[in-house]
Amino acid sequence: MEGKIKNGSNSQLIKRVQAGNNHVYLRGNGKNTVFYKDSERIEFLKRCNSAAKRHNCKILAFVLMDNHLHLQVESKKLVSFVKSILIGYVQWYNK
């Protein structure tokens, strides 16, 4: 599925991929640190595992660096999968 989004005053064409094998890349705001401790990485991976079961996804590979992460995911509902991980992790982290 393709759609147009507004980016400031310019329109750009983006491709939204939902089904298939996808590379997910997430980076800290301003390239800031995302994971300070191993316990934070473990919590993130637990949430990935739970979300994968709920959204019927397969995590094929992952790399968690201090300021970014990569997930290789086979999914038909990629956006809802990633959204559920991030919302849950941010709520846990900010407690």
Image (cartoon, grey):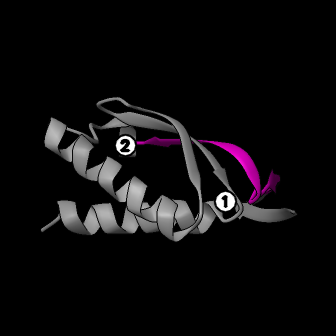
Q: Which mark is residue 20?
A: none
Q: What amino acid does circle 1 point to?
A: Gly
Residue at the image position 87 percent from the left and 63 percent from the top: 1
Residue 59 lies, in percent from the top left, at 53, 45
Residue at the image position 58 percent from the left and 50 percent from the top: 58
| Residue situated in front as seen by the camera: 11 or 17 | 17
Q: What amino acid does circle 2 point to?
A: Gly
Left or right, 5 with respect to 33, comes to right
Residue at the image position 49 percent from the left and 64 percent from the top: 53
Among the 4 quarters of the image, the one containing residue 56: bottom right
Residue at the image position 12 percent from the left and 68 percent from the top: 95
Left or right, 37 with respect to 41, comes to left
Residue 12 lies, in percent from the top left, at 81, 53
Among the 4 quarters of the image, the one containing residue 63: top left
Boundaries of the magenta span: 11-28
Residue 54 lies, in percent from the top left, at 50, 70
* Residue 42 higher or lower than 13, as above or below: above
Left or right, 26 with respect to 34, comes to right
| Residue situated in front as seen by the camera: 34 or 18 | 18
Q: CA distance from mark 1 to mark 2?
A: 22 Å
Please name the residue that numbered disc 1 is placed on.
8
* Residue 60 within the magenta-colored segment of the rendering: no
Mark 1 lies on a secondary structure that is: loop
Please name the residue that numbered disc 2 is placed on.
28
Mark 2 lies on a secondary structure that is: loop
Q: Main secondary structure of the magenta part?
A: strand
